[in-house]
Each structure stands twice: as structure tokens, then as C-alpha cells.
Amino acid sequence: MLVTVITAVKNGESYLPTCFRSVEAQTYPYIQHVIVDGKSTDGTMALVREYAETTMARAASFPKSDGGRSVVWITEPDAGPADATGKGLGIATGDVFVVLPSDDSLYPWAVRTAIDYLETHPGVDAVIGDSTRGWSGTLPVVHVEPPFSWRRYARSGIGLTPQATFVRRRVIAHQGVFDPGFFYYADWEWYARVLEGRKVANVREVLAHVVKHAGAIQISGPREHEVSERRAIQAQWCQPAPPGPVRFAARCAQALRRRIYARWYRRRGVK
């Protein structure tokens, strides 16, 4: 089963090496890495070419029956991360895919964990793992996802981290790509669209690390545009917010669940 990792990047030379090393370190052998560059003006493309050459040189050590290891890249102007990720989806040939931004990374066991679950549960369309998050240069904190609920996710965007979400190709066959009209929350709109009515499972394993930094879209962009996109997605799915007491109870339950799982992860050695 071939897994495609899709990375959209523009002027990402500061974080790209960590992203590439995390894909190289995967214990699962059948990985296609699709990199879509938006005409970077820094050293990004030099890193991409070096990474592609290194992967090709190491490819002989991986089995070929399911595609082995490969890197596919393009560099051309785009309309932003959503447009670039959409191009990546069009190039991807894997049976399963995951979206990995250039400033984030996968843990070495991530792809293997997701594929093992999908292979033993053929009726599951997507698998969601947990993640760690933190500002660049600080210790990461475990982020535990609640059991997936499409209704909650469509309404709030809470319930999955794209970097730790592995989706089968059959799910996206007739759903189209990311909507370039959304700059901040294209992933939220798209996952809500493709996972509606699908069988989604959670695995209690930390699969990805998400880096926060001053240049991140949600942090550096205009707040009013972010709010307008959020309202547009909520209106699109016609998901009214539950009553106040229900929201409060749900937040308390989620906080308790995350504390329990965080303690469990610490006992297993994940800080």
C-alpha cells in the first residue's frame, strides 16, 4: 500500500530539513513524497533537489513491490497553501495520503501505525492520531484528539490534526481538491467535506509534531479574515452551536480526557 505525503512550501528553508528528515526516518517502506513549491526565492529548491537525489540514491534499499520510496516535486507560482496542496493531490498516486506542511514533521512510527490500522480495518476510511505541539525551540506538549465526530468537526474544526490524519484515496475520488477561496481554513473545509458520512477511527498514538512560529498563517495573518472564513464554513454546514451548558460540559469532558491520555503518554515515555 503506497502512502503519499503532500508538502506545500514557499520560502521554507528554515524548517524544511526537519520535515524531510522525518519522512526519511519512517519505518514504513512504501512512501511517495510530493512537494509543491510556490516559486521560493530562498534556498528551498536547493534543499528539495538535494533531498530528491538522496532519496533516489537510498531507494535501492527499499522494496519495489508497492512503489518503494520516491520524491516528486514541482515549482511554480500558486495562490497559496490551499492551491498548492490541491496540486499535490492531483499528482499523488498513493492509496493513502497525509498532508504535511513544510514546518511540521512526522514521528518515525507514524506511517507504519496508520497503515497497520487501515490494513486490519478495511472498512475504515481514515485514521486520526494524536500529535505534539509547541513553539519553535520549546518543549512539545501532547495534543490528544477527542473521538472523532463529524458534526462537531464541521461546526468547530475540532477533532483532527491534518498532519496526523491518514485518508484513503477512495474517500477523495469525487470530492475535489482544497478550495483556494479559503486561505486560513481550507483544510477544515476540505476534511469536513470529504469525511462526511465516512467511517473514521482514532488511534492512541502520537503521529506528528506541529510547530508554532510567528510566520504561521493563523498567527501572522489578519484576524478579521480568519473570523470571516470560520463563519463561512460554519454557515456552509448549517451547524448551530449547542446550548451554553452543553458546550461547557463538552469542554470539561474534553479537558479531562486529554489529561488522562497525557498522563498515559508520559508513562510510555512521550513528553
Image (cartoon, rainbow, N blue to C red):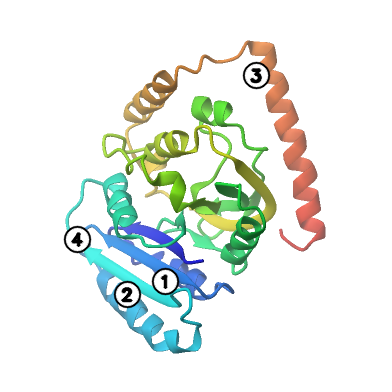
Q: Secondary structure at mark 3?
A: helix
Residue position for label 4: 39
Percent across and percent down for residue 11 are: 28, 61
Between marks 4 and 2, how big is the CA–CA gap? Answer: 13 Å
Of labels 2 and 1, earlier in sequence is: 1
Between marks 2 and 3, how big is the CA–CA gap? Answer: 46 Å
Type of amino acid under label 3:
Arg
Percent across and percent down for residue 131 are: 61, 52
Q: Quadrant of residue 49?
A: bottom left
- Measuring 41% from the left and 55% from the top, which residue is drawn there? 101
Q: Residues within 10 Å of mark 2 (few under 14, many from 20)?
A: some
Residue position for label 2: 47
Is 260 rendered above or below residue 99? above
Type of amino acid under label 2:
Leu
**What label sits on residue 17 in the rendered view?**
1
Percent across and percent down for residue 142 are: 66, 50
In the picture, measured across the screen, residue 96 lies left or right of residue 220, that is: right
Is 264 rendered above or below residue 49? above
Type of amino acid under label 1:
Pro
**What label sits on residue 247 in the rendered view?**
3
Of labels 2 and 3, earlier in sequence is: 2
Between marks 3 and 4, how big is the CA–CA gap? Answer: 44 Å
Q: Nearer the viewer, mark 3 or mark 1?
A: 3
Q: Residues within 10 Å of mark 3 (few under 14, many from 20)?
A: few
Of labels 3 and 4, earlier in sequence is: 4
